[in-house]
Each structure stands twice: as C-alpha cells, then as structure tokens.
Amino acid sequence: MADARRQLRSGTVVLGGMGLLAAALTACSSDPDKRCVDRNSYTAAKGYQVVSDKNCTSAKSAVDAGYYYGGKKKGGWVSGGSFTKPRSGSGGSSGGGHSVKRGGFGSGHGSSGG
C-alpha cells in the first residue's frame, strides 16, 4: 500500500512540474522575438547588426537603433524579420494569416447521442 502511495505522489509531482513548465513556455512564447538593431547596418548577406538594448531605450544613442521583430539571428546579425511590431496573439511570424476556430462546449454544433 505504501508503494502505491509513493508512486501516486511522484506522479503528482511530475504532472505538477509539467504544468509549471507549460505555463512558463506559454508566457515566454507570447512575447515576439524583439532585438535592438542598428538600422544603418543592413547588408544583403547578413541583415541588420544586433546592438545593445540600451541603444533602443536611450535618447542619446550613438547609432540609429530600433527594435526588429522576428527573423533569424546568426552571430551578431539578424534577418528575415520586420520593424513592425506583430499584433498581440498573432501567433508569431508563421505567415499565412489564417486562424483556426474550433467549437467547444456549448458551441451549438452536433448533438449528444441518446
């Protein structure tokens, strides 16, 4: 009996830990990839050079900096993104512009068996 109780407790710990991990990942993924870049550093081969965030928050920046959203970072450079901030809940930079809508409880579709 004690063995079964120990197994149940460890299963609860694992499931609780998974829930915390899922919540943390969801919170992190809601923020778009945002990097401070030098707007004047663009090259076709590399993209924009990533600079310190203080260049985007300070009025006395030595470079013409701005936030660059999305894209892929390689070394100290980023390309394939945009200076336009994505709308909240847009699901990142997957493109396509389609959303999936599903019915749930009380959606009014179908019927229960009988």
Image: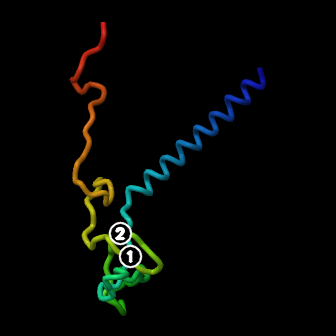
Q: Is residue 3 above or below residue 68?
A: above
Which element carries disc 1, helix, strand or loop?
strand
Q: Which residue is mark 2?
A: 71
**Which residue bears the numbered disc 1?**
78
Residue 91 tag number: none
- The residue under label 2 is which amino acid type? Gly
Residue reaching furthest to the bottom = 62
Task: Give the quadrant of the C terminus.
Answer: top left
Residue 94 location (% of width, % of height): 31, 57
Question: Dot 2 lies on which element?
Answer: strand
Q: Residue at x 25, y 16 (%)?
A: 111
Q: Is residue 57 visible?
A: no
- Residue 13 horizontal side relative to residue 107, left or right: right
Q: Quadrant of the N terminus?
A: top right
Q: Is 12 on the left or on the right of 31, as rendered?
A: right
Please state the horizontal and vertical placement of residue 51, each as a whole percent of the image: 41, 83
